[in-house]
Amino acid sequence: MRLEYFQMVDRILAMDAAAGTVTARCEVPRESPVFEGHFPGHPLMPGVLLLECMAQTGGHMILARNDYGKMAFLAQADRAKFRAFIVPGDELEVHSKLIHEGSGYAVCDARILKDGKTVADAEIRYRVVPFPSPELREKMLGFVAAVGHPGFDRGETP
């Protein structure tokens, strides 16, 4: 993860875009300026960044479902629950499952696991729109390649 840059997903472990499922790995860095203030002497991953992990994981799947031509922007989070503290060095597995898509929106159920136990979950709603600029699309395709979308071939993607 690169917290300062809001790059939360380190690796896509599994994805079935047609079925609307994705699993990602997110490794909490051992050091980050974020932990200097949250909290001094007792560093904890902020809940808002855990929510972002879930949102980005589902966003990767929605991007693939739309043949990398549309981007999912976080629009709403409902029923978010944070069940355990996440600390520097923790390895997280993030799951997201599509529960609705249509009319420019998508909704996913997401959860974060640590050591096989659920530590956070939420329902995430996205606004799904064409990329607002070619530059953003290219940058996102770079992230897609870096995190290892299954079957992604940058040379053949529209």
Image: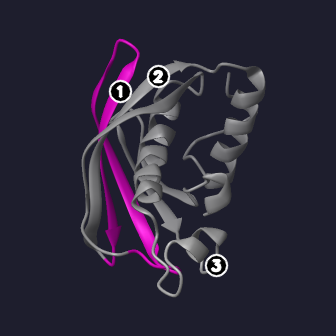
Figure coloring: one colour
Judged by depth in the image, the label closer to the viewer, 3 or 2, is: 3
Residue type pointed to by label 3: Glu
Residue pictured at 33% horizontal, 16% vertical? 102
Residues at marks 1 and 2, CA–CA distance in whole angstroms: 7 Å
Image coords of residue 1 (percent x, y): 60, 64
Badge 3 vs badge 2, beta-carbon distance below 8 Å: no
Magenta residues: mostly which secondary structure?
strand
Tell me which label, 3 or 2, sits earlier in the chain: 3
Judged by depth in the image, the label closer to the viewer, 1 or 3, is: 3
Badge 1 vs badge 3, beta-carbon distance below 8 Å: no
Residue type pointed to by label 2: Val
Q: Which mark is residue 31?
A: 3
Residue pictured at 61% horizontal, 61% vertical? 3
Q: Which residues are magenta?
A: 86-115
Q: Which mark is residue 106?
A: 1
Tell me which label, 1 or 3, sits earlier in the chain: 3
| Relative depth, front residue between 84 and 152 | 84
Tell me which label, 1 or 2, sits earlier in the chain: 1
Image coords of residue 88 (percent x, y): 52, 79
Is residue 102 on the magenta stretch? yes
Q: Residue furthest bottom?
A: 41
Classify mark 2: helix, strand or loop: strand
Image coords of residue 107 (percent x, y): 31, 32
Estimate how packed mark 3 is, as few (under 14), some (14 to 19) or many (20 or more) residues with alpha carbons within 10 Å.
Answer: few
Image coords of residue 49 (percent x, y): 47, 57
Residues at marks 1 and 3, CA–CA distance in whole angstroms: 34 Å
Residue pictured at 40% horizontal, 74% vertical? 86
Is residue 114 on the magenta stretch? yes
Residue type pointed to by label 1: Ala
Residues at marks 3 and 2, CA–CA distance in whole angstroms: 33 Å
Q: Is residue 27 above or below residue 109?
A: below
